[in-house]
Image (spheres, rainbow, N blue to C red):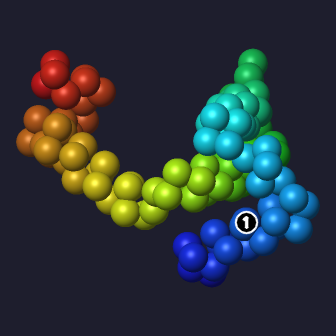
Amino acid sequence: MSYEELLNKVRGFNQERDWGQFHTPSNLAKSVCIEAGELLECFQWRDDYDLEAVKDEIADVFIYLLDMADSVDVDLIEAANRKLDKSAEKYPVEKARGSCLKYDKL
């Protein structure tokens, strides 16, 4: 499934339920954070995890992120590519390889 097909599926899901009225950028940003917290909870207090629960929470984060990006007219693929390009400049391989230092400490 392509990005556009998935985005249209999410749009249709929300439209069928008349949820657009609740999906403001602010509410969607909150929902992304809430779902990310639920993902983190899968790993709380232990190193083992339930893979199915992790998959569900990753999907929830992704779906809300798609919905949020759509609500503010951001193409996630384009934005991710642009950010990777910026990060490549900040973290050149010859300085960053094997290091966890922030770019201003390299």
What is the x, y in percent for residue 51?
76, 49
Left or right of 31, for residue 1: left
Residues 72 and 100: in front is 72
Q: Amino acid at mark 1?
A: Val
Q: Is residue 19 above or below residue 46?
A: below
Residue 39 visible? The answer is no
What is the x, y in percent for residue 89?
14, 44
Q: Residue at x 68, y 32 (%)?
A: 30
Residue 34: quadrant of the picture: top right
Residues 1 and 68: in front is 68
Q: Residue at x 63, y 79 (%)?
A: 5
Residues 29 and 73: in front is 73
Residue 94 visible? The answer is yes
Q: Where the N terminus falls, by quadrant? A: bottom right
Q: Residue at x 25, y 23 (%)?
A: 101
The residue indicated by pointer 1 is: 10
